[in-house]
Amino acid sequence: MNNFFIISPCARAKKASNTFESSPVSPTAKMLSWTKVLLFVGMIVMAGQNSFGQCDRATTVSWTQTLPNTLGSSTTLSASWLYNGSTTFISPNPGVSNFTSSNTSVASINGTTLTIVGRGTAVITATSPTRGYYCLSTATKTITVPKLAQTITWSQTLAGAYGYSPLTLNVTASSGLGITYVSNNTVVATISGNTLTIVGLGSVTITAQQAGNTDYNAATSIAKTFTVTKGTQSISWSQTLTGTYGTAPLTLNATASSGLGITYESSNTAVVTISENILTIVGLGTTTITAKQVGNSNYYAATDVAKSLTVTSGNQTINWSQMLTVAYYGDASITLNATASSGLEIVYESDNTDVATISGNTLSIVGVGTANITAKQVGNTNYNAATNVSKLLTVTKRDQSISWSQTLTNARYGDVSITLNATANSGLGITY
């Protein structure tokens, strides 16, 4: 036990012998000295320390209270301290907060009211009230507010072949929190958000995860494995194939569901030939045109689509814009210029060879009158005969004049005969 000195304003201490000697002091000095002593002693008591600046009385705590750990619950905190093993003081002292929380996001304290506000762990500390020479002491209790458990539900079946449309993954968590997905083989399947896209062949495992948050523990992940096989494909070809000889080349337009290119074959190249997707008719008869897609590393071959095409004789027309209306006897020969759409040669006929004759495509006027000139194309093995085109030709008489420069002046009876020499520009004979 520490020694305490009783200090008198009328005495002074001798350290060596622990005795006191008196010496005369004036009444005023005595009063001032006692005042200082009382103030000094009061300061020591108020500070709870002995004369050496230390607390020297132990305190023990009694805190048997069970603290709640349920979110939203609250309680009034209460702890007791024993001073010197005999006197009990109830905490806290009036106006003094004796409780603190190490994690106010889990447990908050307002005065002596503790409220559970979140999940996690918080240490609640009770501190003894200050009293005289008694030392401060603390007691702690740990509160753990457990996170909730959650589960993942995923009934969706994963299966697919190359070329499948993107799939929406539909996993749900009992917590209502969002799901994340992971593909262990992005060469086979990639994931963006909750959309799975097949990008190649092979095996892949898709894992659904929910990592939890401040209120929920992580859920047990669910993994599903599936194998992506080659995709099937089909050919769509609604085009109707018809044709006659002379029809312009046709662009074939079949498509494959895979987006791969189509190849075409003709069973009779004497009737139809094909270059890439251009069909050209080269003869009469029947052929089968087949559209094919043989597949690749990702797609199986498509089922062929075949169409039969029968090519018949082509129709043709005659174009003849040349004017044959009025001609005069003696006009020069006329070159006829009708053409056939088939490119075949035109033949011409005159129904009155006393007016006009034809040789090849040359028309000669031989008389006055009318004649029907007809252009014909009779067809061949590939083309039907064209419709004839006729034009009426009218040949009229040409005006003529007489030239006579001979001088007939004076003559005598008995002169020799005179030969008259007038001429007509038509070449016809002159009469006098």
Image (cartoon, rainbow, N blue to C red):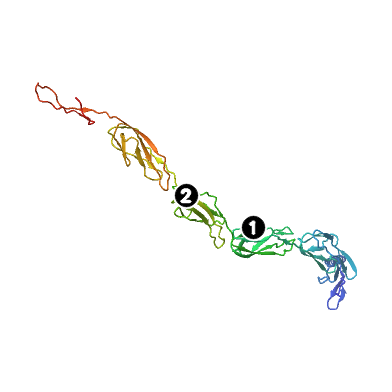
Residue 311: mark: 2
- Which numbered marker is on residue 167? 1
- 262 left or right of 334 in image: right
Query: 160 or 116, which is in the foreground?
Result: 160
Q: In the rendered image of this protein, does residue 58 appear above or below residue 148?
A: below
Q: Pick the residue in front: 138 or 332.
A: 332
Q: Is disc 1 surrounded by few (<14), some (14 to 19) or many (20+) residues within 10 Å? A: some
The image position of residue 276, as x and y in percent, is 47, 55
Residue 207: name its quadrant: bottom right
Residue 61, x across and y down, in percent: 85, 68
Q: Quadrant of residue 361?
A: top left
Q: Please indicate whether residue 184 sits to the left or right of residue 278 in the image.
A: right
Q: In this view, which residue lies farthest toward the bottom?
A: 17
Question: Which disc is residue 125 wearing?
Answer: none
Screen quadrant of the N terminus: bottom right
The local secondary structure at tag 2 comes to strand
Question: Do the residues under discs 2 and 1 have CB atoms within 8 angstroms?
Answer: no
x 23%, y 28%: residue: 401
Q: Residue 377 location in percent, x, y?
A: 39, 42
Distance Cα–Cα, label 2 vs label 1:
48 Å
- Give the residue type at disc 1: Leu
Front residue of 88/50: it is: 88
Which three-letter amino acid code belongs to the residue tagged 2?
Val
Of the image marks 2 and 1, the number of the one nearer the N terminus: 1
Towards the viewer: 301 or 88: 301
